[in-house]
Amino acid sequence: MDRQKLIDTIRTKSSFLCVGLDPDPARMPPHLGKGPEAILAFNRAIIEATSDLAVAFKPNVAFYESLGADGWAVLQETMAAIPDGCLKIADAKRGDIGNTATRYAQAAFEAWGADAVTVAPYMGRDSVEPFLAFEDKWTILLAATSNPGAEDFEFHGADEGAPLWRRVLEVSGTYEGAERLMYVVGATRPEWLAEVRAVVPDRFLLVPGVGAQGGTLESVCEAGWSEELAGGLLVNVGRSLMYASQGFDFAEAARSEARRLQEAMAEELDRSR
């Protein structure tokens, strides 16, 4: 899905919702049973219930890797269940160099069928450009994240007005294929989200943290909106949607939460027109 197709999808669906697919067996409906088949059934039900309301889905690879070989199969089947009209994001947070980075990219883009993959930029250009070499795919760099440990490195230098995440944005913009970069920015730091948007006005931002982590859609839109990109935001919602119910109605409850978010997003899009 290229840039214009993503913009068109946001406008057509009146939504910029990204659904996180991080299946936790301890929180899944008990009637589904246990094991890989239960996880796949859960994922498929969530996807089917929400795909007309979402523009993207984001499986976190760790939840599948932890299951061993069966988990890889569940991840591939989950990716295959996501409709082609939705952006498929592999949340893998890879970060290595050279041929290793290329193999990671092949795993995400070719083996799993992802349209985008999250990447840690700590090792610099030669850990990112192998992903950008895939011309029809997106690379999503970690920038200013919501976790407390982000203060250790990402926000170093913030007191002097030069946090490390700013250098990530500025330098990565010089990479070969940089037009296919997006960035991860946490919803719980709207003041930093506004600063990120000022540095990269023409980039999509993947924004986790709305819902269970305490971020709000209103503050995200106020801080990170881009008129040029139909908002330029992919707001990821995971736990509050996936586990809206642990009963037989779990898919209906997930749809209800997705509908609530989509309607709020539609209002934001209407307001910007």
Image: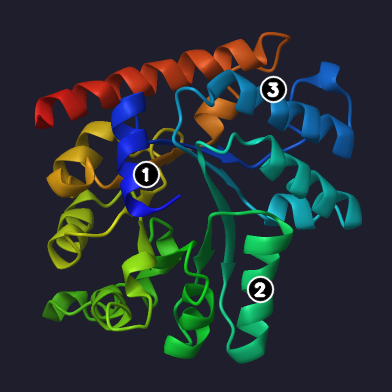
Judging by the rendered image, the residue that carries numbered circle 1 is: 6
Q: Residue at x 22, y 49 (%)?
A: 190
Circle number at residue 104: 2
CA distance for labels 1 and 2? 24 Å
Please provide percent x and percent y for residue 146.
38, 55
Which residue is located at x 36 percent, y 25 percent?
Answer: 13
Callout in the foreground (1, 3): 1
- Alpha-carbon span between mark 2 and mark 3: 28 Å
Evaluate whether residue 124 shows in this view: no
> Where does the C terminus fall, quadrant-wise?
top left
Image-quadrant location for residue 162: bottom left
SS under mark 1:
helix
Neighbourhood count class around disc 2 (C-alpha, 10 Å): few under 14, some 14–19, many 20 upward:
many
> Dot 3: what SS?
helix
Q: Relative to 94, does residue 271 appear above or below in the rendering?
A: above
Q: Quadrant of residue 10?
A: top left
Query: x and y percent of residue 245 in the render?
Result: 62, 16
**Between marks 1 and 3, how big is the CA–CA gap?**
24 Å
Residue identified by numbered label 3 = 45
State which tag comes first along the sequence, 1 or 2.
1
Closer-to-camera residue (250/101): 101
Above-or-below relation of 160 to 245: below
Label 1 or label 2, whichever lies nearer to me, is 1
Against 261, is 159 above or below? below
